[in-house]
Image (spheres, rainbow, N blue to C red):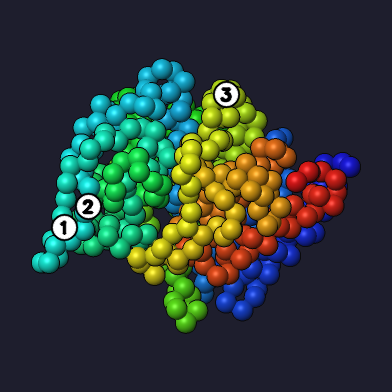
């Protein structure tokens, strides 16, 4: 079957999925979605508008706040340092970022509502940060972290400040998996070793070699013109555009956990690099290391919301066993959408989702800009999108599951 025939077949099916996600009752305002194989994109689609109430259509060059899909990029520039022998994953983080040694373990709150703190018994290592086992949380995924931040006046991570990640440890480092500000600290390690801002390091060591130009922590004038507005869905289903909600420009700190903006075609270049075993940017054995479970007997799972305006409670593929790698979620069982076991995915807070299937040589990205996380319409659209990709490629004889 010709490459063009595959593209045509995907377009016929996937355009309908995007249109349905936007057009159904309570649909998402706009979406961009893409699929790549090892050679290049085999599907690019857009539907809806950049902002509800305005006529500007969503287009494939629309710029999105990437939120936590930033993490894998930060993890990659850290792994370059490991390759160069400049850091070890077993190194204590305080060797590079001494401020982390000041973070205490939270053991609850006393009768007066004051936090009860103790010194950790274990040094936080880079490995723990990369695997989300250091003890950190997020203010919107942890009632305890949120309460501690409010008590101590710690700013939201959306302020893009170093102070915003100096919160508290929710358990002894290394004890379990918990999603949090870990990769922001990884970014500080990268900056300390390279002696440059994280954005400069990414531009030099990753973006330039991969030809990624429409991406950065600070929006260029062109990117600002093409930026999609973030929306908020209320409990009654009403959707409100939030045109002024934008991460600080220029940020005090380049937030390695969530700070990048990009058009989705740029992120596809990163996904292709992973599909092509590093493509000269990192070594094949490093990609293999980044793609395997690093948690051992521990597992990654779902999340609870401590801020319903930003996130719903949820979990990807309940019943599918999941672990964590550097720095992706690994589905240890096949997913209901058709993705084989042992592949990679993650997401971003404004309902962006990607996956990387190294076995079949395909990867996909579904991008919207709406809170709360795991939005009813956008997340359902992503599941339908991934399912349609696998069913179509399987029907065409292009993949094995």
Q: Residue at x 29, y 31 (%)?
A: 93
79 sits left or right of 16 in the view: left
The quarter of the picture where residue 71 lies is top left
Task: Report the disc number at residue 285.
Answer: 3
The single residue placed furthest to the front in the displayed view is 297
Q: Nearer the viewer, mark 2 or mark 3?
A: 2
Neighbours of disc 1 within 10 Å: few (<14), some (14-19), many (20+):
some
Mark identifier at residue 266:
none
User: Of residues 374 and 24, which is closer to you in this image?
Assistant: 374
Label of residue 115 in the image: 1
**Residue linked to disc 2:** 106
Q: Residue furthest left?
A: 112
Disc 2 and disc 1 in contact, CB within 8 angstroms: yes
Task: Tell me: residue 389, above or below residue 289.
Answer: below
Q: CA distance from mark 1 to mark 3?
A: 44 Å
Q: Position of residue 94 (x, y in %)?
A: 24, 31
63 or 280: nearer the viewer = 280
Q: Position of residue 398 (x, y in %)?
A: 81, 43
Which of pointers 1 and 3 lies earlier in the amino acid sequence?
Answer: 1
Q: Residue at x 37, y 59 (%)?
A: 141
Q: Quadrant of the N terminus?
A: top right
């Amino acid at each position: 079957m010709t490459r063009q025939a595959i593209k045509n077949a995907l377009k016929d099916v996937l355009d309908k999925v995007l249109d349905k996600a936007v057009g159904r009752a309570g649909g998402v305002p706009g979406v961009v979605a893409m699929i790549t194989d090892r050679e290049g994109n085999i599907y690019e689609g857009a539907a809806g508008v950049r902002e509800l109430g305005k006529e500007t259509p969503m287009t494939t060059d629309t710029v999105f706040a990437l939120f936590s899909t930033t993490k894998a990029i930060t993890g990659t520039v850290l792994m370059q340092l490991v390759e160069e022998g400049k850091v070890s994953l077993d190194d204590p983080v305080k060797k590079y970022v001494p401020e982390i040694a000041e973070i205490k373990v939270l053991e609850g709150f006393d009768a007066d509502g004051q936090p009860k703190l103790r010194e950790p018994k274990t040094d936080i290592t880079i490995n723990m940060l990369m695997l989300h086992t250091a003890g950190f949380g997020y203010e919107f995924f942890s009632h305890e972290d949120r309460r501690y931040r409010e008590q101590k006046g710690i700013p939201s991570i959306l302020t893009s400040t170093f102070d915003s990640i100096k919160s508290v440890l929710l358990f002894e480092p290394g004890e379990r998996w918990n999603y949090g500000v870990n990769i922001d600290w990884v970014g500080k390690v990268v900056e300390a070793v390279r002696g440059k801002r994280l954005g400069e390091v990414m531009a030099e060591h990753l973006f330039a070699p991969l030809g990624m130009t429409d991406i950065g922590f600070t929006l260029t004038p062109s990117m600002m013109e093409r930026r999609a507005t973030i929306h908020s869905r209320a409990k009654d289903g009403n959707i409100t555009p939030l045109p002024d909600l934008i991460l600080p420009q220029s940020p005090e700190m380049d937030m390695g956990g969530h700070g990048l903006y990009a058009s989705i075609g740029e992120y596809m270049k990163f996904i292709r690099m992973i599909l092509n075993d590093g493509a000269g940017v990192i070594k094949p054995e490093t990609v293999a290391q980044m793609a395997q479970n690093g948690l051992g007997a521990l597992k990654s799972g779902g999340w609870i919301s401590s801020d319903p305006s930003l996130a719903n409670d949820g979990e990807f593929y309940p019943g599918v066993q999941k672990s964590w790698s550097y720095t992706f979620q690994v589905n240890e069982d096949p997913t209901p959408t058709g993705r084989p076991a042992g592949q990679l995915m993650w997401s971003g807070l404004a309902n962006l989702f990607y996956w990387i299937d190294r076995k079949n040589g395909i990867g996909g990205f579904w991008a919207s800009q709406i809170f709360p996380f795991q939005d009813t319409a956008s997340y359902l659209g992503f599941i339908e999108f991934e399912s349609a990709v696998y069913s179509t490629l399987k029907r065409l004889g292009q993949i094995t599951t």
